[in-house]
Amino acid sequence: MRARGGRGRPLRIAVIGGGPGGLYAAALLKRLDPAREITVWERNAPDDTFGFGVVLSDETLGGIEHADPTVYRALQNEFVRWDDIDIAHRGHLLTSSGHGFAALGRRRLLEILHARCAELGVRLRFRTQAPPAAELAATHDLVVAADGVHSATRDAHADVFRPRLTTHRCRYIWLAADFAFDAFRFEIAETEYGVMQLHGYPYSRPSPDHQPAPDLHADASGASTVIVEMREEVWRAAGFDELDETESVARCAKIFAETLGGRALRSNNSSWTAFRTVVNARWSHGNTVLLGDAAHTAHFSIGSGTKLAVEDALALAACVEEQPTLTEALAAYESERRPVVESTQRAAAASLRWFEEVDRYLDQPPRQFAFNLLTRSRRVTHDNLRLRDPGFTDSVEREFGCPPGAPPMFTPFRLRGLTLRNRVVVSPMDLYVAEDGVPGDFHLVHLGARALGGAGLVMTEMVCVSAQGRITPACTGLWTDEQAEAWRRINDFVHTAAPGTAIGVQLGHSGRKGSTRRMWEGIDQPLPEGNWPLTAASPLPYRPGVNQVPHALDRAGMRAVREEFTAAARRAARCDFDLLELHCGHGYLLSGFLSPLTNTREDAYGGPLANRLRFPLEVFDAVREVWPEERPMTVRISATDWADGGTTDEDAVGIARAFADHGADAIDVSTGQVVPDQQPEYGRSYQTPYADRIRGAVGVPVIAVGAISSWDDVNSLLLAGRADLCALARPHLYDPHWTLHAAVEQNYQGPAAPWPDPYRAGSRKPPTGRTDAPKPRLSLLPRA
């Protein structure tokens, strides 16, 4: 049995991989317990390194300062710091300030960590391939696998770690320039082969009062990392797949000659590669644990690789120190780090996709393009960009067309004959409190309160076009005149009490998802009794063995449903709704025709997308014909099913384009809820990229939905050109006056967010109890 330290802490530790994460983990673990015997295996020589400069955040540096002041002081003496981001595109160079970066050469970072490990007594074995992790695990208390994105440890135990590797669509190459950029620079080159982009930042910059330890290849002018990136098809079309390293480097320098001032680029065993996102279901196996790129990767465009590895090392060392057993330590390490890493990976994925699809944004106005780039990961937002650089943000708002003093969300928007006073939509929310389809006082209060709360457009829940088309017995409808009169009462209140607020109706048919209990009684569960027959595109139950098998609509059934929609639309017009939305998402009847997972028909209404669109378009055309010409009509779709074999990105664009061609004034872009085994990628604003894609590809206004939770999110999405309107549901359940409160918090008092006269006294935020009041003296000073 191997000896162990106090409280069962490991004494003998093996580290596989001598990159920043592995070295820093070794140094910290040794510093916390000098009795530990720690060995680092690194297959390369000590002066070998790949890549050039690395960027660390102030947050990461703060952790290093606390954990090891010696390493922090050494890093402080080497860092190049700067605040600006330059964005060059189509002859425009726009600069945004106040961002705060710190970088140094990767080689110098490794030298500092080598020295610290040697000083502490860590054994460094260079030019030595580590034994397999299983062998090391038998002779060591802890094995730290920091062996990178191509981790042999992870591959050897794939059955336990269960890695998921995703290779992306761009090729990129790491290079360096022997001069220092003044800022973090993004450059877009539109070539005859396609779009190419440069990411560049300084990592060595001599100054009069300090000469940092130079990069071995840099000259006296400093040095910068330069990454050149482009889509795979562009890379091949340009012939890079046939060039060797020297030829590739020279070609890149020529493409970006103006940015480089005619200077050459240099490489260091640089090769073109496609980024791979690494995700593992587990990070530890027995006494072996993954760290850094072996455990996870995040795209370089948010500068996260070294940062995450160093933070992993900090957390691992701390957890080993704090927990009574190694098993508990490794569990605590993963529990602490996984949420942080997953958040970073979501941001990195958004950034990666932005650069993969940058050609969609090339025609944006210059300042909007720059703002879009800066906010691509959703970590930089309108509000914090305003704090960093108010002048830049003001210029973007002016270009967008914001009225003087108005944030983007309070910029009016016109749909056909309807002008919305602001860009906030109260999203449709099923309430399940109607009787016989008749909306009652609860609906009046619910919709009326949110209309008084300042939103530009308030949407009803899905209003069913027939009794058979209900989701639950408690859904509202528009198949009778009694229901219509009840809706008119609500609309009259909204138009009278909240003048300027528009109210829209969402018409739909439940399809195979009908005849179920109310949400809080068992979501998607059939009624215990009194079920009614269901109809759908195909005879596929929503949950086999749980929900009933629907009847596949024949031509006569489709004609009947179409007439139900048009009858409901006529009633909606007489009720004085301002806007009508056709629900073609979430797996309900019309959505069931659109998705290949729910439409298996072999007639003219099944098969290719054009056929699957046929019936939903017939319904849309019929409704548009009876809906007043001056009033807008929108369509809600599910842009992905979040399931293999479902609606593709190309399908979503095709669906949106078809409805736009038939006269839809906007597309309300939601996702999922089509099949029960969906796997959504939840996260803040997680559905908005689909709206963004449709807006760019089709040119139709879009309504973005999906975990948009703050007015800062709304402003950011609008100003970046990713959406025209933003629909929010849960925030309006939490706060019916969400829009008015957003205006108060942004010091906006203009016409796009008027307070109702009876509520004006509440238009200032109430004071709260003071926490910064002077403290009373409770003791005497000691006598001299």
Image (tube, rainbow, N blue to C red):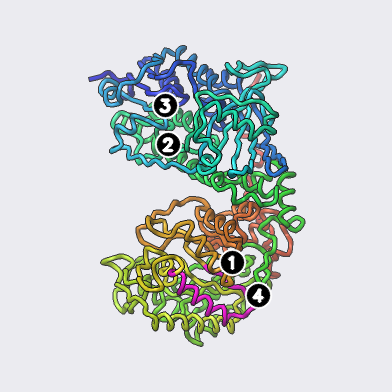
Specify few, some or many for label 3: CA neighbours under 10 Å numbering under 14, 14-19, or 20 or more. many
Q: Position of residue 602 (x, y in %)?
A: 35, 71
Kindly indicate the quadrant of the structure image that contains residue 589. Answer: bottom left
Looking at the image, do the residues carrying marks 4 and 3 touch, with CB atoms under 8 Å apart? no
- Residue at screen point 32% across, 25% down: 142
Eye-nearest disc, 2 or 4? 2
- Give the distance between the C-alpha atoms of the residues marked 2 and 4, in whole angstroms: 54 Å
Quadrant (top left/top right/bottom left/bottom right) for the C terminus: top right
> Secondary structure under badge 2?
loop
Q: Earlier in the sequence, mark 2 or mark 4?
A: 2
Q: Which residue is mark 1?
A: 666
- Give the distance between the C-alpha atoms of the residues marked 2 and 1, in whole angstroms: 39 Å
Question: In the image, what residue type sits under mark 1?
Answer: Ala
Q: Is residue 759 left or right of residue 572?
A: right
Magenta region, residue range? 611-635
| Disc on res. 296 | 2
Q: Earlier in the sequence, mark 2 or mark 1?
A: 2
Specify few, some or many for label 2: CA neighbours under 10 Å numbering under 14, 14-19, or 20 or more. many
Eye-nearest disc, 1 or 4? 1
Q: Position of residue 669 (x, y in %)?
A: 52, 62
> Secondary structure under badge 4?
helix
Q: Which residue is mark 4?
A: 497
Question: In the image, what residue type sits under mark 3?
Answer: Ala
Q: Earlier in the sequence, mark 1 or mark 4?
A: 4
Eye-nearest disc, 2 or 1? 1
Looking at the image, do the residues carrying marks 2 and 4 touch, with CB atoms under 8 Å apart? no
> Secondary structure under badge 1?
strand
